[in-house]
Amino acid sequence: MSTTKNTVFINNEEHAFEQGEMILRLLRRVLGDDPVPTLCDAPNLEPFGSCRVCSVEVALKQDGPKKVQASCHTPVMANSYIYTHSEKINRIRKNIVELVLTDYPKEKFEEANPSQNELKKVAAQVGINMSDVRYQPGKKNLNRTPDENHAYMRASMDTCINCYRCIRACDEVQGEMVLTMEGRGFDNKVVMGMNEGFKESDCVSCGACSQACPTGAITDIYASKFNDATKTERTVCTYCGVGCNLDVATKDGDIISITAPYDSEVNQGHTCLKGRYAFQFYNHPDRLKTPMIRRDGTLQPATWDEAYDYMTEKFTQIREANGPDAIAGISSARCPNEENYLMQKFIRAVIGTNNIDCCARVCHSPTALGLQRAFGTGAATNSVKDIQYTDCMMVIGANPTDAHPVTGAKMKQAAMKGTKLIVIDPREIALARYADYHLQLRPGTNVALLNMMMYYIISEGLVDKDFVDNRTEGYEDFVSNITNLDLDKMEEVTGVDRNLVREAAICYATAPNAMSFHGLGVTEHSQGTFTVMQIADLAMLTGNIGRRGVGVNPLRGQNNVQGAADMGAQPHQGAGYMDVTNPTFHKQYETFYGVDLPEHIGYKIPEMFDAAIAGDLKALWIIGEDVVQTDPNTDKVKRALTSLDMLIVQELFMTETALLADVILPGASFLEKSGTFTNGERRVQRVNKVLEPIEGTKADGQIIVDMMNRMGYKQADYAPDTMLEEISQIVPFFKGITWEGLGKNGKQWPVPEDGSSTEIMHVDQFKRGKGKISYFDWKESKEIEDNGSEYPYIITTNRELEHYNCGAMTRRTNNVQILTEDVLLINPKDAKDIKVKDGEMVCVTSARGKVDIKAKVSNEVKPGVMSTTFHFPEIMVNLITSDVHDSEAKCPEYKVVAAKVRKSKGKYAEKSEEQLAKA
Amino acid sequence: MSENLSALSGRKGLEKNLFEQLVEKSKVEGTPDNEDLKSLAHEYLMGEAITYGTASFYDFLKKDHRHVKAHVCNGSACLVAGTQENVKTKLLEHYRDEEIGHMCCLGRCHENSAFNINGNNYSGNAIEQLDKITSSHIASLTDNYKVSSNVENPILTGERLTAAGFASLFQKVLTNGADWALEQIKDSNIRGRGGAGFPMGIKLESCKNVSGDQKFIVCNADEGDPGAYSDRYLLEAQPMLVLFGMMVSGYIVGADKGALYIRGEYPESVRAVTKAVEELSEHGMQGKKIGGSDFNFDFKVIEGAGAYICGEETALLSSLEGQRPEVRVRPPYPTQRGLFNRPTVVNNVETQAAIAWIVKNGGKKYARFGTSKSSGTKLVCLDSFFMNPGIYEIEMGTPFKEVVHDFGGGFKENVKAVHVGGPLGGIVPTHKIEILSLDFESFANEGFLLGHAGVVSIPEKFPMIRYLEHLFEFTGAESCGKCFPCSIGSVRGKEMFEKARNGETRIDRQLLDDLLEAMEDGSLCALGGGLPLGVKNALQYFDDELRTYFK
């Protein structure tokens, strides 16, 4: 037998091992999934060594003395002999499991299913049953009160075997540290928080503990790992742009639970409470189940044919009378690529206008535009995985632990372990606690702050000259501008100490690899596109582009907002980002669609509203977007929608927007159709149909196809594979994508013909050739200039973990038990000034309107700045937000609202008193 | 063992230490209140569960410790001496039952009747003067034991090293350099005195070779084996020796911080070392630019809070970080990723204390003491059953009977066995004393363990079944609870022996053997893994006495 440094013998058979590999990993690799029993090991947790059941015997030479070693945490020694099932090992395992059974409830053990309960499985593997236990009855830890108060989490700790998996999952995966052992030795018991219940603790309901638990001591209301599902289908989450893979378990056509697959490259067995638990909306009684047409002022049920006929007739009429530009469509970033592609195709090729847009307009349109201008491609340059390779993370205008929880958890994990973290945000977001630098700027001053950072990068001599010389243009102009920066003024307007900015700039610039992440706190400003370009500038000045652990990485909001834009759901570029006014591309599209296409750019969403009010836009088809609740300046949005001749709303629920519709089309949820979503790191993943669309509803793609055919354009029935085939022929970066080829984990575009995936972009050169470095002066927001003196406070809007956007879905799940309403965060000083106590109602007025909302006194915001959400229609926070837009991409400035705030009067004051009394 | 918690705790480091804060917060009420735990958790960026879970682990921090004012020593030596009951009875005259807790070995094994009041330890006849103690808060009464050695120029028990002596000896190290110092230690062949016997030179070298801008030296002064009070002697009588060893270690590996984790059961040791550190500061031998060189070194004294497992080096590191002191898996070894995830050398008090002699006289000279595999001398602690209880510095390889007879002066009464090396050591029947020599190999070859070389005598009259029950009980009480064989096995073992002693159920020998095997081979650390040795010794040598308890 050969003896090399990588040789090991398993049960006397020679194998090769990898340096540093643990024995258990080797055994799994060589012998298959379950080579030795284990109770404490879990796929996404560090080796822990508590159960000792995975022990094996190891001899350093053939027939040498053997030692019992736990395989999970013992590295393989070269030329050693590993025995997995020796007589001694079999005996020790059995005797350890016997000990475990002495403190396990007998009845529950007998009832347990070995394919679900890992203790029962392991007991069978080692050959012991409850009746075989030889110990006399003794001390037990079985007397634990079940915890049944939480919206989702459940605990009945009598079946806890103290394997620590839950505690480790809460720490190593989610990073929340809600669970601990209390006591010592045999008396150890897992407790939540300070021995409270899940509900009272700081639990974020991610369910990582429940997924980790081997016996179901910690589980959830769905008993996710312990129910009698008959089928499991893997799909992609419909909530945020992280793109978590989900295993959806069904029985008799109902979804009974969701878990996270460990082999998912995106989420590695983790997900958040929205992905894991908030699926109850899908068959909620409120689901729209029939088309409706407004007749005599009220929405009345109709057949699909009636609805289609009505729409066809109206579209035709309007097009004839007012031209195709009187019709517009808003596609849905919640829908798959294929449906977005179809919608823009319908508007362009069937109606004959470029009036197509999607919610990217109100979130990341400045990112797409800004990065296109700077790099040539409007998408993340790197992958989330790069967090593990970077030395410095700069998070600007994003709150990932709430809005992108799985990515947020990864950032938190890295930050806790020492990766440098710079947070630029007006609020003290959760990540700010772990940050090396928190630059808590006044909303609306991103450009000023980033200019300060770049000023210092230049003045400290930290520019990567090689990168700038070889790969960029515009540097000289940039330097001549930035060196004249008025630091005194910038410091004053941002409210951030210049030394802190300087230190943060040095931190970013000197890190071997620095990456940035940004969210809507960057884009939803009047200078949003410029800010994106500044973030690109920062990366280029410091050479942080084109390798692992660097880049500019927008955290895309909706599950498929990247895809909706990729597919051409925007008025200036068609599928694949080709300019509709460019004759070559225009011709290409005309040939491909086989029709004449318009050559001028269409309306962006805000322009659609203006056009509707002006009487130029007559019909609007909105899919899966509640513009009334979520777009700024609600009154104006309502005025626009009610000015239309025909508003079509394709939805799951009767949203605030749907209430105004002339035609309602009941669409299908992500669980009821197939297609692909593209996440924030450009990863195109398969969405697999779990259930048939519930009765009365249709896959949204099929609805569009039906209408295309009605309107005389021949389009085959909706199917994801054939749709993808069509898309791959027109979208250049989808060239190598096929439905089958996407596999389990999808592919990151650009995917060339050979089908390879792209984790990092702009490695050797930018899409546009040289990267463009640009300088921008900071400009005070028009909102502040016009209204700032009359309305002294600045309100900024944000999201909470538990709810998604307008809340149409999450409010129809138990998530409402966890977060029940929108509140306004007020700094204690401001609260004192306006004489408001925590929990009282305040009246907030802006130049647009007023709302009454409950105050939450908090240090999360600085004096002068307040923050709130718009998840609940009861409040309608967007009554006060402004429709001032980003100068370039027309993204609304949700983040800066000048407001007056006082204690509520009248009925709201009474409500306030009631609530205080209750508290 | 959480990498996250290590890192978060490391943000504040040793200077403002989380564990120290927890201990501090417990001083008034006997346990930190929940508000303190919450605010510490927030301050250190951890979940509230973390500080709560940590506090619940320790005898002197947990909720049950609220209002406890007096502690009775429940260590093995006081148990076999039979003094605990009297101490408790006397204390009850001054305190309510719930105000009396216990401490596991105050290191007063030489005279027993040990107890602790208001942070002071007492033993011997002090319990008879309780009125005086409670009224006037006398710091200490008697604590007399013999100290001597069978080597001429003792390594550990010689003349007390002063701060000035420390400074001049360290100057020699600075002059000769770190490589020279490491060479001396390697030449000395000194092995760790904590029990595992790992060569110190190799440990230092491996830490030196790990790159890292921050490294730590940790002195494990929490080895609380009942019966072993040699560390206490060194900390109180020879603190400079211990500090010197740490500083040399730091100089060798490139560490500028040293932590001494001292048992909370040794309040005098904490005070003595704290005072010694202050003296060093006065002599410019602590802080920046030690002895005018570029070498910086700070000492930090941390007081434990009542958990035997913290003597296990990885549990100790977790404790220092404010985590629950649960034993970690290795790798990573502390020299690779130790305190606050940084390279760390952990050494026992006695090992550190030998370094001064080694650099003064040369490593090769040290190696001349003892045997080829066990070089140097070993401190042996003899308990109150000996005519001459005390600390004896014995050259390795010395016949054990010389220690027992020549130094100990023999036994005061009939003793059937000596338990050497703490609760996890071997139970040596008296007839085996004759054939053992004092070194790692001789004890191992005979199926015993030298360990820490504390000697607890088991008198003829003390039932072996009760002693074995005590060992299981001790392990059960001190188990961190992480690994299944130890946490569950120790309790089942205790129940087995208790039921046998009560006459309820005789012991199934096969079941006991299975239990001992599962614990010995299956446990994560030496606590569960070490307990079976003594039990097996007793089963072998005291079969006659124990037979009636078996089926």
Image (spheres, helix red, strand yellow):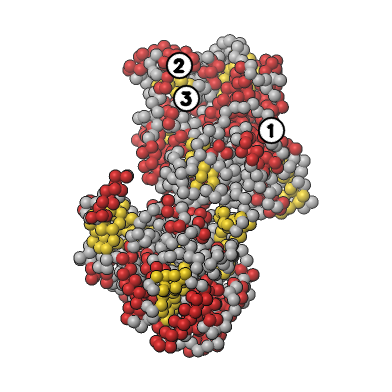
| Chain letter of the residue beneath label 1 in the structure image | A
Q: Is residue A890 visible?
A: no
Along the line of sight, the residue nearer the viewer: A580 or B109:
A580
- On whether disc 1 and disc 2 are found on a single subunit, the reply is no
> Residue at label 1?
A131
| Chain letter of the residue beneath label 2 in the structure image | B
Under mark 2, the amino acid is Lys
Residue A816, compared with residue B491, is above or below; it is below
Q: Nearer the viewer, mark 1 or mark 2?
A: 1
Under mark 3, the amino acid is Met
* Residue closest to the far top: B413
* Secondary structure of residue under mark 1: helix
Badge number at residue B103: 3
| Chain letter of the residue beneath label 3 in the structure image | B
Q: Is residue A21 visible?
A: yes
What is the crowding at mark 1: few (fewer than 14 residues within 10 Å), some, or many (at least 20)? few
> Residue at label 2?
B88
* Residue closest to the far right: A1
* Secondary structure of residue under mark 2: helix
- On whether disc 3 and disc 1 are found on a single subunit, the reply is no
Please indicate whether residue A743 sits to the left or right of residue A514 in the image: right
Q: Residue B495, image x and y in percent?
A: 60, 24
Under mark 1, the amino acid is Ser
Badge number at residue B60: none
At 70% across and 52% down in the image, what residue appears?
Answer: A32
Q: Residue B62, image x and y in percent?
A: 44, 32
Please indicate whether residue A564 sits to the left or right of residue A124 in the image: left
* Secondary structure of residue under mark 3: strand
Label 3, label 1: how many angstroms apart (C-alpha)?
40 Å
The answer to whether marks 3 and 1 mark residues whose Cβ atoms lie closer than 8 Å is no
